Image: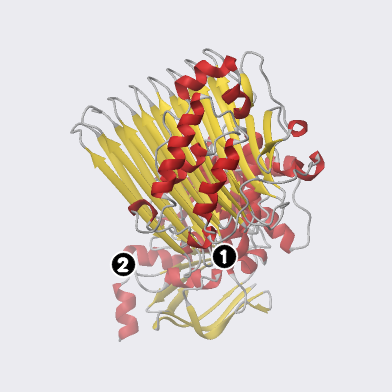
Amino acid sequence: MELKEKLISSFMAFENTVNVDSPIHDIRINAIKRFETQGFPTKKQEAWKYTSLNSVLKTDFSVFPKDIEALDYKTVKKYLIDEIDSYKIVFVDGQYASHLSETTHDDIDVCLMSSALTKAKYKPVIDNYFNKIATTDGLTSLNTAFSAEGAYIYIPRHKAIKKPIQIVHFSTGNEAALMLQPRNLIVVEENAYVQVIERHQSLTDNPTLTNSVTEIFADKRAIVDYYKIQNDKQSATLIDNTFINQKNDSNAKVHTFSFGGKLTRNNLNFYQNGEHIDSTMKGVTIIGDKQHVDHNTLVHHIEPNCESHQDYKGIFDENSTGVFNGKVVVEKEAQKTNAFQANNNILINDKATINTKPQLEIFADDVRCSHGCTIGQLDESALFYLRSRGIPEKEARGLLMYAFSNTVLDSVKIPELKNRITKIIANKLGVNIGFDL
Amino acid sequence: MLRINNLHASVEDKPILKGINLEVKPGEVHAIMGPNGSGKSTLASVIAGKEDYEVDEGEIILEGEDLEELGPEERAHKGIFMSFQYPVEIPGVTVTNFMKTAINETRKAKGLEEMPANQMLKLIREKSELLEIDRKFLSRSLNEGFSGGEKKRNEIFQMAMLEPKLAILDETDSGLDIDALRIVANGVNKLKSKDNAVVVITHYQRLLDHIVPDYVHVLYNGRIVKSGTAELAHELEAKGYDWIKEEVNA
């Protein structure tokens, strides 16, 4: 059976596990219908021209994991950033792992989507926000249809949360192949602040397919710092669909660090529903043999006096493929928009490929929109300069590539996280960079 | 210390150096002068090991060892330093971190431990004072947005940090105002000892007023066509290069 058919027929079984009388379930039913009509995206669709899911969809993924294996902290410690005090919402094969987590209900809610979708006290928030900005395409609809578990974060007005929140998904390989569909909702009210670190990690080489949807709402003057660490095994496929709605004077940043996995697709969408909004999207991609990373971004400038900044750096080795498709829409009303987009790439190997495409749709006349993309090799004269000072070629290359991605690392606000990413990068580049930049 | 025998080098099959002979002994300062396009910068780059140049004939011997098979980093480890005419801008790497990496990689190559952090800091402080470099400057990205004078001062700062046996200063005076020229020259003079040597490559006499050479060589059309003492530099300043060209072509 094709995965699409399998998912559609699994929906009935899924209905046995959730409350079908809840209004949420009407949303799910509509969503599975949409998925039935649209199915998975194909390369015929413009937005998927350079990324094919065909080979991934051939795998016979289990939709419901059978036995959940208890993971001990020791096994997963290295994937958590525990040098800092943080809240943690940890899932193992899609199920909440309480012993690895640290949730809270003091002033703020850092807990589970399964609670939020079923308990009366969360109903007003769910009614207001759930599935309000997630799109209606096939993959997002599929996630909506099966939405039951994930992270639920609610930061009420004026609460600045110093402790970052880690959302971590582990897959144990208990199933021959497993599909996961986490659904996250993050509501940051007026003048509140939150930092989130998200990671998906397979612990074995059994294939995983994660189709994740995250909805983020940043109210007036809210600040959201979101970090995605994508450094999964070669057996892992991640389709990340993130939607961010911003109101007046809010500031939202998403940093995406893509270092591993067979196929990673990031659909990152910002909607600016207000004035004086700042949206930032930054990414570093460093991949090698048979890896594919696709960044598909959208910034929708709807009202005047807003800014958006995009800075994506990519380093591609061996038979790797990168895609950057950055769409900026500036509505007629969105005068004085300042939109900046940069995508710079280094191809280390002539077998590596990058497809980069800025897409600007500007309907206002008094705006500043710029975009630039470069594709090149390492600067040979810089390499000679470093080597002439005694830095061996391999280290010099690593240092230059590290420096290249440094503009993105620069704005990571959590030092421990920055440190961790630095180490991953040094490791990816095969150098021991003996200093912190 | 350095002996160059009948060196021929080319870039993309175009011969540039056509039989250079030069001997530099410890404690000496040599100046290499010559008109534009005579091969001065090529000579510096070939000694430093730039791979764009092909050595077709001859040899470069440093302390008895042929450098031919050595990469630029290995030559640096053996004590060769070239001050670049156009130092490369490297955004994202600070001056301090660049120097730490360069020093520790050189130490590693010599089988030494990394330099302890406090010792490194002390060294950086001492050498930056010598070149009158502001501390803030050291945490900036390497050469990025530096003025011409700052770039050159930074080159000599690197020389001071790495303490090479043989320093080649490639047009270090170009783009310097008189204050920067004095600081740079003063730095070089303070680093001079009986054990190291300096080769100054320049088009003009003025740097040689500050760094006084023991020998002056005139490079023309890929060959050293005339050698002399500091007097020769003054003569060139007064008379230009045309008489040399005429002498050679006669």
The residue carrying pointer 2 sits among few (fewer than 14), some (14 to 19) or many (20 or more) residues within 10 Å by Cα, namely few
Q: Is residue B92 visible?
A: no
Asked whether the viewer can see residue B89, the reply is: yes
Q: Nearer the viewer, residue B219 or A95?
A: A95
Q: Residue furthest left?
A: A365
Amino acid at circle 2? Lys
Q: Nearer the viewer, residue A14 or A154?
A: A14
Q: Name which residue type carries label 1.
A: Asp
**x and y, in percent, of residue A386 in the image:** 56, 59
Quick one: SS at disc 1? loop
Q: CA distance from mark 2 to mark 1?
A: 62 Å
Between B135 and A384, the residue placed more toward the observer is A384
Which residue shows up at 51% across the image and 40% down it?
A143
Indicate the position of residue A303 as horizontal and vertical percent values: 28, 25
User: Residue B239, which numbered label?
Assistant: 2
Q: Which residue is painted at 43% across and 63% down in the image?
A: B202
Quadrant occupied by the C terminus of chain A: top right
